[in-house]
Amino acid sequence: MFNFNLYKENLSTDYFGQSIRYYPILDSTNNKAWDLVSENTDNGAIIITDNQTKGRGRQSNKWISIQERSLTFSIILYPNAVPNQINLYSLIAGLAITDCLIENNIQAQLKWPNDILINGKKVGGILCESKVSGGVIKSMVIGIGLNVNEKITDIPLELCNKATSLQIESGKQYQLETLLANILNRFEQRINTRDTNSQLLDWEERCAHLNKKVTFHTGNEIVTGIFKGLRSTDQAILIVNNKEVVFESGEII
Ligand code: BTN
């Protein structure tokens, strides 16, 4: 059961998470968020559930969560920004999450485009969806899934060498409400105070594979090269056969 008092005590934002919709059970917080967008729910409102039963990941993957152990929530924004800012929000979400984990002495890193890793294993992901019209982003739903208090037995066997949780890595238990409030505090602060360039530099500093050999899956192609960083919020640079190549989409395998 979500503890509203604990959440509010820790929240120091102007609008991120000031309006909160809590559901004991939901198929997907992103789905619910889109229903609420059509009712013009507040800018910065968040949707959270204790038990997400049909979480959606990027590229039509499933996102599995454990009741009251995983943090699963979505943020509604109406940014009125140009469409190339969509990825900026997604990168900032990853930075805000890693800010909080690092404050908790957890050495979290980022993997292009926006996976959260600890010791090379995935601990969190971000699903950023948007509706663009008339050349501006009218509405956006940023869904965040973070494995928090899962035990090793909660991780499906076939994912054990790829996925982890904060508790598995640190041996500690975390209050979901405090973590949520801190992520929102950091997210809003980053949007208000840091320009795109410094966000890109921060992202590169936290990147788990900067200057390392990576295999990139883009469209029907599989490319191997050295990851050299970000040219912009939606462009990753790789050195492939001694040539600089820029990718605007794709996944690191
Ligand atoms: C990914 O890494 O593929 C992104 C995973 C995003 C999962 C979150 S959990 C909360 C929100 N609701 C969803 O259905 N998905 C996102």
Image: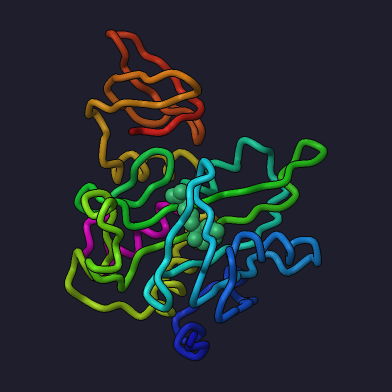
Q: Is residue 99 visible?
A: yes
Residue at image location 51% in from the left, 84% down from the top = 8
Residue at image location 66% in from the left, 58% down from the top = 77
Residue 45 magenta-highlighted: no
Find residue 51 and report its horizontal and vertical position in percent: 49, 74
As displayed, is residue 38 above or below residue 114?
below
For the record, the magenta segment spans 93-108
Instruction: Find residue 246 and report its image quarter.
Output: top left
Residue 98 magenta-highlighted: yes
Q: Is residue 92 left or right of residue 208?
A: right
Instruction: Please tell me which residue lies in front, 79 or 151.
Output: 151
Find residue 30 and report its horizontal and vertical position in percent: 61, 60
Magenta span: predominant SS is helix
Question: Which of the image's four quarters has the C terminus?
Answer: top left
Instruction: Find residue 143 and report its image quarter.
Output: bottom right
Find residue 107 and report its horizontal and vertical position in percent: 22, 57
Structure colour scheme: rainbow
